[in-house]
Every structure is written in C-alpha cells, then in structure tokens.
Amino acid sequence: KALRGMVSALYDRIDANEQFAADVAHEIKNPLASLRSAIGSLRFVKKEEQRDKLLDVIEHDVRRLDRLVSDISNASRLDSELVKEEEEAFDLIKMLRNLT
C-alpha cells in the first residue's frame, strides 16, 4: 500500500508539473505576442505620440514578464521547501519484505 501511495503521489506530481508548464507557456506567450506586435509597429510609426504609446506597451509587457518570472521563481522555491517537509524516513527492507 505504501509503495502504491508513493507511486500515485509521484504521478500526481508529474501531472501537476505538466499543467504548470502549460500554464506558464500560455502566460508567457501573451506578453510576447504583444511585444512582437508593438516592436513591429514601432518600426513604421512616424508620429512621436504613437511611438510613445507603443513604448508604453513594450514597457508594460516587459514588467509583466519580469513579474511572471519572479512569481515562477518564488513558486518553485516554495514548492521545493514543501517537498522537503513532506519527506519522511521509511524502512526499505521492511517494505520489500511486505511485498513478497
């Protein structure tokens, strides 16, 4: 039972990591698309007022990406600390004997 529980917990963790990676990719793609568009438009804009607006968009998206990277880093550190706290010692020999 203990081994099944650990395997199940491992699969749950793998699923959670895959979902997290998909969420992060989605969150990164939005500001990147906005940045790409603003930078592409900036090359052709002649009026200073329009250039300033595009630069504001670029600055906003860079701050957004910076916050996202910080949040991911903090979440990763927190997750790592939680995993360490969940660890507990077990008797491997006893567990293997119970399997036979």
Image (tube, rainbow, N blue to C red):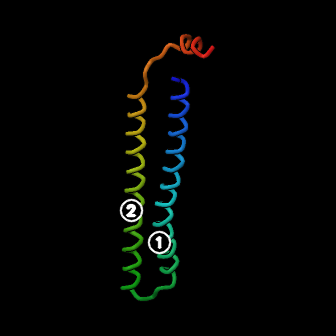
Q: Which residue type does callout 2 highlight?
A: Arg
Identify which residue, 12 or 18, lies in the foreground: 12
Quarter of the image that includes the C terminus: top right
Q: Which residue is mark 2?
A: 64
Task: From the image, tell me which residue sits under label 1.
Answer: 34
Residue drawn 56% across the image and 11% down it? 93
Work out whether residue 90 or residue 61 is closer to the camera in this orientation and state it.
Answer: 90
Label 1: few (<14), some (14–19) or many (≥20) C-alpha neighbours in 10 Å: some
| Neighbourhood count class around disc 2 (C-alpha, 10 Å): few under 14, some 14–19, many 20 upward | some
Question: At 41% from the left edge and 88% from the top edge, which residue is drawn?
Answer: 47
Q: CA distance from mark 2 to mark 1?
A: 11 Å
Provide residue 53's location: percent of width, then percent of height.
37, 80
Element under disc 1 = helix
The answer to whether 31 is drawn above or below residue 5 in the figure is below
- In the rendered image, the residue lying farthest to the right is 100
Image coords of residue 45 (percent x, y) = 47, 85
Q: Would you say 62 lies left or right of 100 here?
A: left
Left/right placement of residue 32 relative to residue 75 reads right
Q: Which mark is residue 1?
A: none
Q: Nearer the viewer, residue 13 or 73?
A: 13
User: What's the residue at 37%, 45% (across, down)?
Assistant: 74
Q: Amino acid at mark 1?
A: Ser
